[in-house]
Amino acid sequence: MHLPKLPTVFVKGGEERKAFFTVQARELIAAGWVEKGTEEVKPTPVEEPKAEVEEEKVEEKPKTRRTYKKKTEE
């Protein structure tokens, strides 16, 4: 089937290719090509300042011993 816009131009790495059919367009998109004019600007990753990691202080509870009452026979 023909594409609605003939020819549809795809771009990858500065190289351009024209596609006339949907099969050609699907193959180019699968290979990483992008339709010309719909190219999205990739945002550059902004490095966030690393916060000083404070060691979490875990409060240790004193160990307790359980004492059981002996059962007395009645």
Image (cartoon, helix red, strand yellow):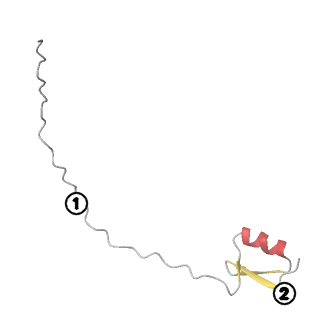
Sooner in the amino-acid sequence: mark 1 or mark 2: 2
Image quadrant in which the C terminus is located:
top left
Taking the image as shown, residue 17 lies to the left or right of residue 72, namely right
Question: Picture coordinates of residue 28 (x, y %)?
Answer: 76, 72
In this view, the residue in front, 37 or 17, is 37
In this rendering, position of residue 53 left or right of residue 16:
left
Report which residue position mark 2 lands on: 6
x 81%, y 87%: residue: 5
Q: Name the secondary structure under disc 2.
A: loop
Quickly name the residue at label 1.
54
Per the model, the C-alpha gap separating discs 1 and 2 is: 60 Å
Image quarter where the N terminus lies is bottom right
What's the residue type where badge 2 is placed? Leu
What amino acid type should be assigned to the residue bearing mark 1?
A: Glu
| Residue 3 x/y as whole percent | 83, 81
Q: Nearer the viewer, residue 72 or 44?
A: 72
Residue drawn at 57 percent across, 82 percent down: 41
**Element assignment for label 1:** loop
- Give residue 60's position: percent from left, percent from top: 15, 44
